Amino acid sequence: MLTLFLILYPAVAAALLLIVKGERVKQVALVAALVELVGAVAAFAQFQPDASSQFGFDYAWINSLGIRFSAGIDGISVLLVLLTGLLVPFIILSTFNRQYDRPALFYALMLFMQAALMGVFTARDGFLFYFFFEVALIPIYFLAAMWGGENRVPVTFKFFVYTIFGSLFMLVALVYLYYQTPVTDGHHSSAIADFYQLKLTPAAQGWVFWAFFIAFAIKMPVFPFHTWQPDTYVESPTPATMLLAGIMLKMGVYGLIRFILPIVPLGVETWGKTAIILSVIGIVYGSIIAIRQRDMKRLIAYSSFSHVGLMAAGVFSQTETGMQGALIQMLAHGVNVVGMFFVADVIFSRTNTRQLDQLGGITRTTPKLTVYFMIMLLGSVALPLTNGFIGEFLLLHGVFTYNHYLGLAAGFTIIFGAVYMLRMFQKSMFGPTSVRTGTFADLTSSESLVFVPLVIMVFWMGIYPQTFLKVTEPAVVNLMKYIGTSAVSLK
Amino acid sequence: MLPIVLLSVSGIGLLFLGFQKSRTLLLPAALLFLLVALAANFYDWNKTYLYFNDMLRTDNLSMVFTAIVLGSAFLVIALSTRFIEDEEAQPAEYYGIIMFSLVGAIMMISFENLIMLFVGVETLSIAMYILTGSDKRNLRSNEAALKYFLMGAFTTGIMLFGMALLYGSTGSFTLAGIAANAVNPQQGLSLLLYVGLLMLLIGLLFKVSAAPFHFWTPDVYDGAPTIFTAFMSTVVKTAGFAALFKLLSISFGGVYTFWWTILAIITAITLVVGNVTAVYQNSFKRMMSYSSISHAGYLLIGLAALGAQTKQAIVFYSLAYSVATISAFGVLLLVAQQRSTQTLSSTGVANEGFDDFNGLARQNPLLGFAMAVSMLSLAGIPLTAGFWGKFYIFSTAVERGQIWLLVVAVLMSAVGIYYYFRVIIAMYFRDGATEPIRVSPVYRYVLLAATILTLVLGIAPGLLQGLF
């Protein structure tokens, strides 16, 4: 039942928020999101580390077709539920110094987005998953297109059409899988657990693999489906970018783990290498482009593109370490990327620019920002004792086990990551002050408050990752049974 | 049966009401008659009756289709408040003709004999020819009516010829009689039967504006008064698909393998023509007419992949499509009346272009929301009824293994998003007139009802299960 609360409550809160008038709307939205955070933390804390699905509910939805409104939290969902619950209140908090036109609608869309994301990560029915997968697109589209930058309309439209186009193929694959399940009580079944039992022919697995992969690859994005991403990240208002990069791209990685690996193992056997090669190309390509960027937001967008490539490669390595790494890295990356975008937003709000060559010397007046920026940055470049290290190490280990050369190529992400991140830090924080940065004010208390939980997460996950690894492990081990290749254990 | 009687009587009654000087009574009377007919429709629920020497059959399916048709007509007529104010208009006659056309639609829905189908098609069509040309002083309306009439009359001839050929090859006009004589597994279909079936299909596909029989649609939809365009694109289409479904599933379900190819090709052409041409339109109304062609294409998938799911798919899709279309035309009516740009086309009529919607959501959040939901539903995005309509239709195709048809449909759905979102973009992200549009209470209720219905069916599509 907790899952039902997690999905329905933000949607109801969003609807109620529309009635709130005036300045209070920010505070009300924050309180609403904090209540959801309590729910998500409760789910995480009470989660029994085994392979079962917990806190679930199961109602009839379309009886004649056997489609059920069924959701629950298992080891693969739990970190993403935590992530979704954790990030949204702090994303809302990060907007406290900003004025948005029609604020009630703005925050209502954010909470509605949260409801859809919770649905995506907990759905136990294939069609319910698809339903939420698409629904999540509507609020983020309006958030980006209504409050975005100058060029927002064509950019967000490209994003929308691109992602819908991809997911339509997934719908075809889901309907196909549905008709492959055995008939019980006069209808087929669309439960994901029943999809796992299917033994499809290799040819069918091939096209189902691609139908799913294209949908998820566009969402993440994996090279060469990434062309929507940098523009959309830059043109969106920062809170929407945070939602996109922090949570929404995880829908793609989650889909890979939830659907592709267990349902079409032979497809993965055949095409997994292609997918890994595409991902590794994305890692290297994204990093190199990031090094050349001058716009902070665009730089972080490309770094995110590069990082998610590593997650995809880790998943397709079909190793337990790779999978575990992807799960923990999803959480870590969500925390880090939101932190980085917030830094960019803070700088932009004070200087009205994100161009690195117009910045510099900020650190002179901002001890707090410098420290927080540095911590988030170290997390992003995967320094040991930070959250990024654990995830990237496991991921690289997985890819390396799969293929040494690909592992080596993927390893560039750490070197390049350090290069572009430190370059950004250096260009913006050090050096002589520019006209724009001369009177840079340090973080306000509400801004600092956003960083505190993120920093705690960076160190907690970096120093004692076992808290998070142990809840996902049984589910991952269970998933490996469907994959059936030589599992490389963590121990 | 009861609705047919009631609608015929009320049609005549409305004509007599027209003698009165005051017009205020007409609209409520028409709505009341429709409500009574709608209620009477369900009187025979769960019973099956045959009427007129077994020429008509009412069963649950026909009642569901009748309900969709009458419900759509109710919503459309509720939006026709403008006739009362317009000196030129003849509301009594319009309402009378609409009632008679609904009789024709119900005959098409519940026919058991091809003769009855023909009578139904003609009753509906002749009423439509008149309504299309009802804006007498508008050249485009006149042109549309003439075009529609000439082409319609021609296809009626083809359809009748097809029926004659079917009679010649099977010796029967009844659905069951044709079914009994159509199956000949050794030789397949006889040539006579095949040609007859094709001609009959052409006649019906013309009515639902499937390509390549769609050429009348854009001009007629564009030229007719918007309120009748809304009527045509919902009532005529639903009735046409009910008739097609009945004909193909009862009479020709047994020989599916012989005709599905040709229907699948028509479906694919319809999908491509409708969607791709809609992209290039600058007038909202013309875009909606091509969109109606494309939706005919989606509905045809259900028939080309005839199976256990088809009935449910067609009923749900027709309903979702009708509700969304009425809502879209309702907003268009308001926008065109109060906000049309000054640029007039050569015929002196406003263009009803996408630009007229600029900034609508800011000035009139309700209108913007209703239109956005309607467009999302037509585009088939989840949370709206249109998504489940597409979902059911796609499942029929998968069940029959029509994967290539499905791929065409999926690609065209993506194209569809492009032109539906032009409206949403114009409404939400562009700046336009600052004067809000006045929305009368009737419009508000109709739009709210359509929007809520679309969302409710989008969240809980299982609600209608009892109806199938």
Image (spheres, rainbow, N blue to C red):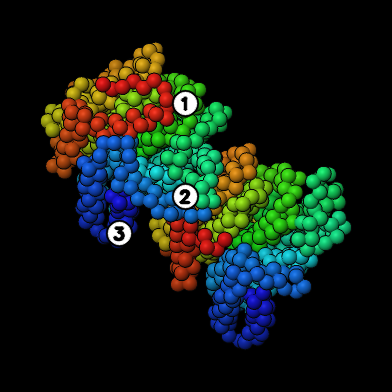
Q: Which of marks 3 and 1 is in front?
A: 1
Neighbourhood count class around disc 3 (C-alpha, 10 Å): few under 14, some 14–19, many 20 upward: few
* Residue tagged 3: A16
Residue A268's label in the rendered image is 1
Give whichever of A216, A126 is nearer the camera.
A126
Residue A470 seen in the current view: yes
Q: Residue at 66%, 60% (x, y): give it.
A: B242
Residue B11: percent from left, percent from top: 66, 78
Q: Which of marks 2 and 3 is nearer the N terminus?
A: 3
Residue A424 vs residue B58, the one in the foreground? B58
Chain at numbered mark 2: A
**Residue depicted at 54% across the width and 51% down the height:** A186
Mark 3 falls on what kind of element? helix
Q: Which residue is most to the bottom?
A: B20
Label 3 lies in what chain? A
Image quarter for residue A303? top left
The quadrant of the picture occupied by the C terminus of chain A is top left
